[in-house]
């Protein structure tokens, strides 16, 4: 089985994933050397499942620009309980309120990187 061609984009291949629960932040280091630091609340706001997006028709490959303006208080809904690998293309985040429908693929996570560099790039792409 040749699956390597699907993952040859270094910017969408994670080298390491750390969920820092005391800091409420998840860090992904990518194969191209970029590091993404996600506040848990951002990940929850961007949960890609049909329920959070308001129906299957609203599920997209890219995060909504709105999620970057969400403010969440510290609550079970914004605390990560576990992060589980899903195949070799994604991870599932289980939240302390029991929500576990969100499958975050690498492409989505990379597009969700909140750093100024990536946000600038997204704006230039007209998003
Ligand atoms: Zn969800
Ligand atoms: Zn970034």
Image: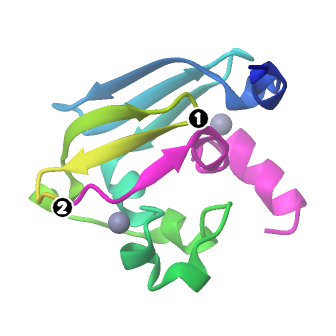
Quadrant in the picture for the C terminus: bottom right
Q: Residue at x 15, y 56 (%)?
A: 74
From this view, report whether residue 34 is shown above or below residue 91.
above
Q: Position of residue 10 (x, y in %)?
A: 77, 22
Query: Which mark identifies residue 89?
Result: 1
* Ligand 2 lies in quarter: top right
Q: Report whether the residue tagged 2 is closer than 8 Å to ligand 1.
A: no
Mark 2 sits on what residue? Answer: 77
Relative to the observer, which residue lies in front, 30 or 73?
30
Q: Nearer the viewer, mark 1 or mark 2?
A: 1
From this view, report whether residue 102 is shown above or below residue 11.
below
**What's the CA distance linking mark 1 and mark 2?**
24 Å
Query: Which mark identifies residue 117?
Result: none
Q: In the picture provided, is 115 more to the left or to the right than 72?
A: right
Q: Position of residue 69 (x, y in %)?
A: 49, 69
Can the viewer see residue 10? yes
Q: In the picture provided, is 56 more to the left or to the right than 10?
A: left
Q: Earlier in the sequence, mark 1 or mark 2?
A: 2
């Amino acid at each position: 089985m040749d699956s390597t061609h699907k993952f040859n984009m270094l910017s969408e291949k994670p080298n390491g994933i750390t969920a820092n629960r005391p800091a409420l932040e998840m860090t992904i280091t990518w194969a191209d050397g970029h590091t993404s630091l996600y506040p848990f609340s951002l990940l929850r706001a961007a949960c890609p499942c049909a329920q959070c997006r308001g129906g299957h028709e609203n599920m997209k490959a890219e995060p909504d620009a709105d999620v970057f303006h969400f403010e969440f208080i510290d609550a079970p809904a914004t605390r990560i309980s576990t992060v589980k690998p899903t195949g070799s293309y994604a991870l599932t985040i289980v939240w302390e309120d029991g929500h576990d429908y969100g499958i975050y693929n690498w492409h989505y996570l990379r597009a969700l990187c909140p750093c100024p560099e990536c946000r600038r790039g997204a704006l230039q792409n007209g998003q």
